[in-house]
Image: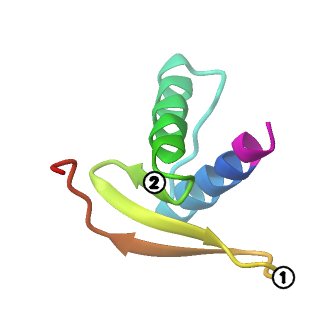
Amino acid sequence: MFIHDIIDEKIYALTTMKGFELDETDGQDAFTHMEMRDFAEEHGGLLFFIGDEYYLVIKIIGEDEFLIIPTEYSSDS
């Protein structure tokens, strides 16, 4: 459960930075949140997407805020 809490915090930080607010009582927003969480879980809780943009979201020990770094991503392996 702990990893979900951290991922949820990172999603909140990313959506806040981008100016989006996800309302988990709204069906579409809840679906978007779950998609973001599933993607993050598949990528070790470090890689996130919002829209068609991808970000590394890192928690540095001892810091209150997350380090959010734009990155490129391709699903081609």
The residue at the point 40 percent across, 50 percent down is: 50
Q: Which residue is mark 2?
A: 48
Q: Is residue 76 left or right of residue 45?
A: left
- Residue 26 lies in quadrant: top right
- List x then y, in percent, for residue 33: 54, 35
Q: Which residue is mark 1?
A: 62
**Magenta stretch: residue 2 in it?**
yes
Q: Is residue 57 left or right of residue 71?
A: right
Q: Which residues are magenta?
A: 1-5
Q: Is residue 8 left or right of residue 46?
A: right
Magenta part, dominant SS: helix
User: Dot 1 surroundings within 10 Å: few (below 14), some, or many (20 or more)?
Assistant: few
The residue at the point 80 percent across, 76 percent down is: 64
How far apart, in angstroms, are the residues tagged by discs 1 and 2? Answer: 22 Å
The residue at the point 15 percent across, 49 percent down is: 76
- Looking at the rendered structure, the kind of residue marked 2 is Phe
Residue 37: which numbered mark, if any?
none
- Looking at the rendered structure, the kind of residue marked 1 is Gly
Along the viewing direction, whichever of 41 and 31 lies nearer the viewer: 41
**Magenta stretch: residue 22 in it?**
no
